Image: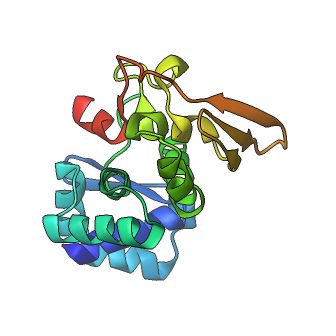
Amino acid sequence: MASAARLLETLNREGIMLSTVGDKLVVEPASKLNSELRESIRSHKADLIEVLAGGRPLADDFDERAALAEIGAGVPREWAEGFARLQVIRPPSGIAIWRWQQVVDDAGRFLDGWATQAAALGWRMLDVFGVHPEKPVERFDAAGLIWCIRGGEVIAIAETTAKLRAPSGAVQTYNRRDPEHPEAVAVWTLEARS
């Protein structure tokens, strides 16, 4: 099953999301599949359905992903474990697949480029990965930095703010919440709540 999780990671990097409907796999967008990926999905179908239906990676694969993020990016273990979860869980109900993939990609880029500095400046897990538990799309008052990047990039970070460059080129300031928003939850817990 670790190979199924690796296949999901490969598909995610290609912008392809898998979900399940009963015992069938749904591929979005199917137009991005080449013959090699199609065959890999076919040969790992049962394991893919099990991983997707469970909404969580196997312990060995999860630990490996978390350790790589923690050691490779030098981030707090809680952030690394959360990112490992984000890479394999299904998009929560009410969040478009493309938006969920964007959050995963934004989180990965943030961990690679800014997480060490953010942690050293005192940013907490919910400052980075927080969302409103019931209305993450509508309620930005509980949104952490990752939710607000929206396909852009972090260009600077300080103790209480981060500068974001939107895909359009506009520069925005994200203000870290202090104290943490009482309703905020980690983005990777949304799947379990849907």
Residue that sits furthest to the bottom in the current view: 36
Quadrant including the N terminus:
bottom left
Residue 152 visible to the viewer: no
Q: Residue at x 20, y 46 (%)?
A: 22
Q: Residue at x 71, y 41 (%)?
A: 164
Query: In x, y percent, where is residue 186?
Result: 35, 36
Image check: 64 left or right of 98? left
**Vertical position of residue 144 compared to residue 75: above or below:** above
| Residue in the foreground of this view, choosing between 25 and 88 | 88
| Residue in the foreground of this view, choosing between 157 and 63 | 157
Residue 134: quadrant of the picture: top left
Q: Residue at x 39, y 66 (%)?
A: 69
**Vertical position of residue 155 compared to residue 184: above or below:** below
Image check: 187 left or right of 96? left
| Residue in the foreground of this view, choosing between 17 and 120 | 120
| Residue in the foreground of this view, choosing between 79 and 47 | 79
Quadrant including the C terminus:
top left
Residue 143 visible to the viewer: yes
Query: In x, y percent, where is residue 182?
Result: 35, 17
Q: Residue at x 56, y 65 (%)?
A: 32
**Vertical position of residue 43 compared to residue 93: above or below:** below
Query: In x, y percent, where is residue 50?
Result: 16, 59
The way the protein has been coloured in the rendering is rainbow
Residue that sits furthest to the right in the current view: 169
Query: In x, y percent, where is residue 27?
Result: 42, 56
- All told, the count of numbered labels is 0
